[in-house]
Image (tube, rainbow, N blue to C red):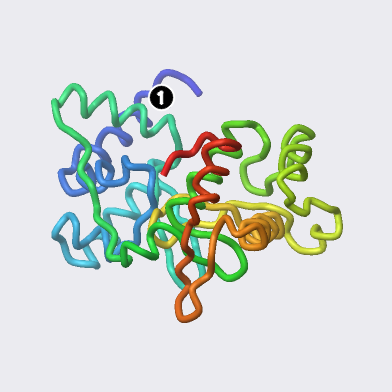
Amino acid sequence: MNNIDIEDRLAALTAAIADRTRARMLCLLMDGRAYTATELSAAVEVAASTASGHLARLLEQRLIVCIKQGRYRYFRLTGPAVAAALETLMALAGVEKPIVKSSTPTSLQFARTCYDHMAGEIAVKLHDRLHQLRWLEGDENYRLSDMGRTALTQLGVDCSAALSRRRFACGCLDWSERKAHLGGALGAALLNTFIERSWIRRQLDSRELQLTPTGKKVLKAHFDITL
């Protein structure tokens, strides 16, 4: 890429950010979560059709990515480099990050089932912590490190190869947190362990999961997660 190409790319990139509506969308996405076009259009107070045009422009400049989850399409920042650039611009502008509030009931936001694995605040924190501890590796299809396999096995999680008949481990976009929680066979095995050991309890008439006092101690002792 020569200097002229870089200058043209920079001009197109900054023009995409310079529009007030698109800038507001990018700021809303700074929390690292993913949102639907409907949610973003409501947050920035424009029509859905107008929002779609703005999102297309941001996608074209690779400032955001689109994630398909079932019949829904979510949008989030492309990655840390985009977030860092926006953070710098926001600091120069002297503004704070805005917040989009979830409409998900509070009890379900905290912990619930997502088919056969755990979702909600607890699940997202577990997902992130497993990567921070380097027990999980990879960007899309996760794999367990030797250290992770040993640690989870000691906790009673079934990490056997038999589970790999389905997708072993992957990020699943969380409905309320709008960040990834752990899906796949490993996510199911982790939930099973939490239930079998009474670290978490199912509710008979709801997807809600309740964290027990013992579960809180386990999260703190083994994952350094405080809730």
Where is residue 85? Give x, y as percent.
33, 27
21 over 37 or under it: above or below: above
- SS at circle 1: helix
Left or right of 143? Residue 23 is: left
The residue labelled by disc 1 is 6
Q: Which of the pair 140/65 is nearer the observer?
A: 140
Q: Which of the pair 109/12 is nearer the observer?
A: 109
Where is residue 190? Give x, y as percent.
66, 55
The quadrant of the rendering that contains the C terminus is top left
Q: Residue furthest front?
A: 213
90 over 214 or under it: above or below: above
Residue drawn at 27 percent across, 65 percent down: 103
Give the residue type at disc 1: Ile
For disc 1, the neighbor class at 10 Å (few under 14, some 14 to 19, many from 20) is: few
Left or right of 41? Residue 193 is: right
20 over 184 or under it: above or below: above
